[in-house]
Image (spheres, helix red, strand yellow):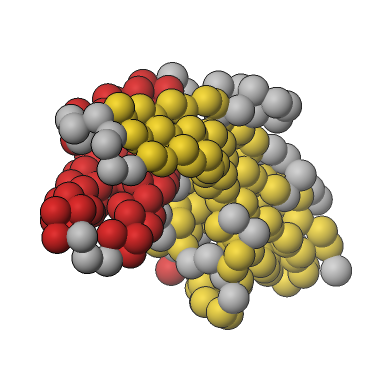
Amino acid sequence: MRGEKVRRNRNNSGQVLLIAAFIMASLLLSAQLYIFEVGKISNETESDSLNDFLLALKLGSRHVVIGSLANISNGGQNSNLVWNLQRWSSLVSRQYQFGKNVLNCTLRETTPYASGIWISWGQNGTGVSSAYASFSYKLSDREVDIDQSYFMNITTVVFIESYYQMVSGDIKQVNVTISILNEENHALAKQITIYYKLLDSWQVPNATNNYTISDCGDGTYQASFVADIPSQDVEISAHVVDQRGIYVHANATSSQI
């Protein structure tokens, strides 16, 4: 029952993030299109307004890909990425009606991606949530001709390492190091939940386990807890939501020292 509630909360969170991403993308593009048109009429700073418009287009695309990955990683369907990008392309086309205006999106199909998505939440201490899409944009009217290609690769990676020390009997002091990357850069977590396996069920350590977690900087966190775990193999799982709302988790076996 608790698992169903967690999944429902994650689904709701992912949907809210996706809606926010579309609103942000649309506002960015609308504002820059207006500035672009004003620049054309006044013949002033046309180059700057064109560059700002293209930047807004790319930022809008980035928001949609991030929002889609947040939605998918929180329980949404993988097909949401292509559907959302189709909506984004349609929105872009409707924004400018004074000439040819087309945005095409292609999802990456090269392994490990399928339909632009790579989700790998394995047992080897590494978890990956990633989306990859390529874009080609063409705009042409009497005064301007644009032909731009770009891509968006949004990737959240989590690495975990763990070791434990025997305290007494089956009581163990367990330490977990969690590292988070966004596009290979150190990143911050919005939420981290640590689990440990006891018999056949996953448990969340709390104050009764002397649970602590601290931010060490550079996207690294240290968690520690004490638990009565009969098994010699201590299985650990770290469930992470980054600051963009993208969910990822990684599992590992803690080593005794």
Residue most toward the bottom?
216
| Most foreground residue, 28 or 68 | 28
Residue 202 lies left or right of residue 72; in this view the side is right
Residue closer to the observer: 128 or 191: 128
**Camera sees residue 63:** no
Give coordinates of residue 29: x percent, y percent: 24, 47
Q: Quadrant of the N terminus?
A: top left
Residue 253 visible in the current orientation: yes
Q: Residue at x 59, y 61 (%)?
A: 180
Quick one: which residue is furthest to the right in this view? 257
Camera-side residue: 249 or 106?
106
What residue lies at 55% left-to-right and 22% top-to-bottom?
A: 115
Picture coordinates of residue 87, whole percent (x, y): 29, 25
Q: Is residue 174 left or right of residue 104?
A: right
Q: Residue at x 35, y 27 (%)?
A: 102
Percent position of residue 125, x then y? 72, 50
Left or right of residue 142, residue 189 in this image:
right
Q: Quadrant of residue 39?
A: bottom left
Q: Position of residue 81 (x, y in %)?
A: 42, 28
**Rendered image quadrant of residue 21:** top left
Placement of the C terminus among the 4 image quadrants: bottom right
Count up the numbered dots: 0
Q: Is residue 72 above or below residue 148?
A: above
Which residue corresponds to the image point at 43% horizontal and 26% vertical from the top-left? 104
